Each structure stands twice: as C-alpha cells, then as structure tokens.
C-alpha cells in the first residue's frame, strides 16, 4: 500500500488529503511524525502546509485520523488549537506515553516515525 501512496499522480482518483490521512493512520501509538516528512513521502516535499490543512480538516473523516501525532519539524504542537481545547493534543500524546514540556515533545527524535524510512 505504501508504494501506491507514493506513486499517485495529481490527476489520480485519490486526492492529496486522502493520501495524507492514509499515512497518518499508519503512525503507531506512541510515535509522532511531521508535516514535512509526510509531504516528502507523498512525493510533494513543498506541501508541508497542505498536510497541515489536511490535519485541520481530519475531524470530518468517517474513519478516525490520529492528527495529534503530526507535529512541526521541531516536535512542537503547532496544531494544538484545532483540537477543541489548548490541552487536548497534549493530553492525547501523553496518554500514549509521550512527554510534553512547553508544547514540545521531550526526546522528539526517539518518538519520531518517518514514513520515508518506515514504509519503504
């Protein structure tokens, strides 16, 4: 499935947001990824912001998208205001064993899940 996600063309039936959601659903509990890593995996390295927009709209999906696991490149919870409360994203991550201090993941690289390395 990961190869199919990577090789989709812009004109294909599967739109970018759908592919983003599919990748995000693969992030294991207790791990996090970044907007940029997901964009690179999908073959659109300049589209990190579009990945963020997809995360902002993920609550509209029929199947759950663990958007709380997607952070900025420095491990900061930049999307926390889209979770219905300023502490919800932090609480979701902490419930998965990830420690947060000052809106950042402690030991970020130990928790980082990069689809470019994991889904090859």
Image (cartoon, grey):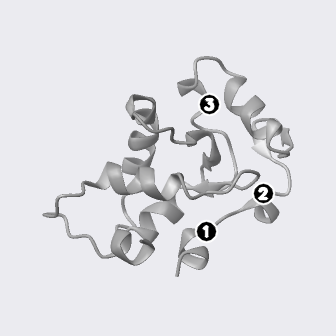
Residue shown at the point (61%, 57%) measured from the top left: 27
Direction from residue 35 to residue 30 in the image, left or right: right
Q: Are marks 2 and 1 in contact (CB under 8 Å)?
A: no
Direction from residue 42 to residue 69 in the image, left or right: right
Direction from residue 76 to residue 97 in the image, left or right: right
| Residue at numbered disc 2 | 108
Marks 2/1: CA–CA distance: 12 Å
Q: Are marks 3 and 2 in contact (CB under 8 Å)?
A: no
Marks 1/3: CA–CA distance: 21 Å
Q: Please report whichever mark, 2 or 1, sits nearer to the chain's N-terminal start.
A: 2
Q: Is residue 43 visible?
A: no
Name the spot of residue 3 as percent of width and height, x first: 39, 78
Q: Is residue 7 visible?
A: yes
Name the spot of residue 56 as percent of width and height, x first: 44, 34
Looking at the rendered image, the quarter that the N terminus falls into is bottom left
| Residue at numbered disc 1 | 114
Name the spot of residue 92 as percent of width and height, x first: 73, 34
Q: Is residue 104 above or below residue 114?
A: above
- Name the element at disc 2: helix
Q: Please report whichever mark, 1 or 3, sits nearer to the chain's N-terminal start.
A: 3
Q: Nearer the viewer, mark 1 or mark 3?
A: 1
Q: Please report whichever mark, 3 or 2, sits nearer to the chain's N-terminal start.
A: 3
Q: Which mark is residue 80?
A: 3
Residue shown at the point (44%, 72%) measured from the top left: 2
- Name the element at disc 1: loop
Q: Which mark is residue 76?
A: none
């Amino acid at each position: 499935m990961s190869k199919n996600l990577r090789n989709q063309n812009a004109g294909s039936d599967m739109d970018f947001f759908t592919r983003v959601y599919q990748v995000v659903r693969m992030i294991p509990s207790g791990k996090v990824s970044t907007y940029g890593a997901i964009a690179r995996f999908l073959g659109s390295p300049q589209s990190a912001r579009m990945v963020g927009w997809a995360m902002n709209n993920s609550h509209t999906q029929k199947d759950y998208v663990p958007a709380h696991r997607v952070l900025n490149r420095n491990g900061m919870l930049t999307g926390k205001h889209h979770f219905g409360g300023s502490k919800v994203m932090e609480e979701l991550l902490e419930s998965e064993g990830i420690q947060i201090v000052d809106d950042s993941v402690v030991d970020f690289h130990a928790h980082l899940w990069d689809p470019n390395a994991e889904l090859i």
